[in-house]
Image (cartoon, grey):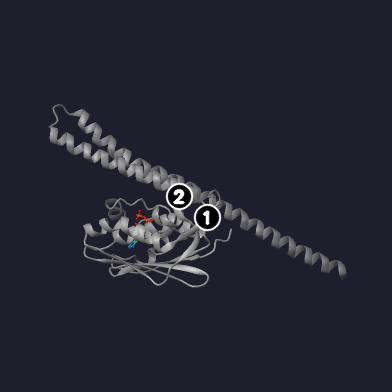
Amino acid sequence: YMDEDVSIKGFSEMESISESFNQMISRMKQLEDSRQEFVSNVSHELKTPITSMKVLADSLLQQEGVPAELYQEFLVDIAEEIDRENKIINDLLSLVKLDKKSGEMHISTININELLEQIMKRLRPIAAKRNIELVFESFRPVIAEVDEVKISLALSNLIENAIKYNFDEGWVRVSLNADHKFFYVKVSDSGVGIPEDAQNAIFERFYRVDKARSRETGGTGLGLSITRNAILMHRGAIKVYSKENEGTTFTVRVPLNYIA
Ligand code: ADP
């Protein structure tokens, strides 16, 4: 009797160990797949501007007596591709720094109202070019323990996107609030919105709803993964609410006191 009982218990324990082992293996396979996908995405994204530059340079070199204007035009295009390559590399470097395992936190006490005002001051001229109204609404002064560079990057990305994916004459509203534990930033826009079935995917690296549009606006598809990583490193949370052709709201919640 006793023996049987023990052996049954032993067996079910073995079973559960082998189950967790299988789960671990399948998790490792998932990680390896996503790593390979990342590397292949990075290579593709880095190659695209280089291919364009090569085509542009070759077509100039292969012709004799190219008119000066055409020369000038192609050089402008080449310079744009170089800018794009630079942006991708910078975003990739930010992303690597924001990797949860390798990323270090440099925590200091920051006035979040001032931080948001600085970001908006920098972005206001860009919004003004397309007559987009940029409003900041603060419900209270907020002082928090954060990594200034990371939080600043995270919030800038959200506000830049709200401008980028907006209509001319649209609006962007940024609001800041807090309770005794968290501060909350809400970035709402009157822009193109995000289809419901894409709302989870936008946080993935290199994902873009509309590749052509994003490329036109200089997007790399890395912005929101950078933002989400930065927020998660502060043990915060980010959510999106959106309706196509009506607009998008991102809400961010970050603890006032950093918990390592
Ligand atoms: P990108 O560099 O393309 O802007 P992001 O990671 O910042 O990359 O955003 C991913 C995609 O999510 C964008 O390409 C865009 O399609 C969509 N998106 C992000 N923010 C907004 C927004 N405020 N309104 C509409 N679409 C957005």
Seen in the picture, residue 63 relative to 96 is either above or below; the reply is: above
| Percent coordinates x, y for residue 106 in the rendering | 52, 52
| Percent coordinates x, y for residue 108 in the rendering | 51, 56
- The residue under label 2 is 95
- The residue under label 1 is 107
Report the front residue among 72 and 147: 147
Residue extending furthest toward the top: 64
Residue at the (30%, 40%) spot, across then down:
82
Disc 2 on helix, strand or loop?
helix
On residue 4, the disc is none
User: Mark 2, residues whose alpha carbon is within 10 Å: few (<14), some, or many (≥20)?
Assistant: many
| Percent coordinates x, y for residue 207 in the rendering | 39, 55
Question: In 3D space, how far apart are the residues under numbered discs 1 and 2 (Cα atoms)?
Answer: 18 Å
Contact (Cβ within 8 Å) of mark 1 with mark 2: no
Residue at the (49%, 51%) spot, across then down:
98
Amino acid type, callout 1: Ile
Please indicate whether residue 63 sits to the left or right of residue 179 in the image: left
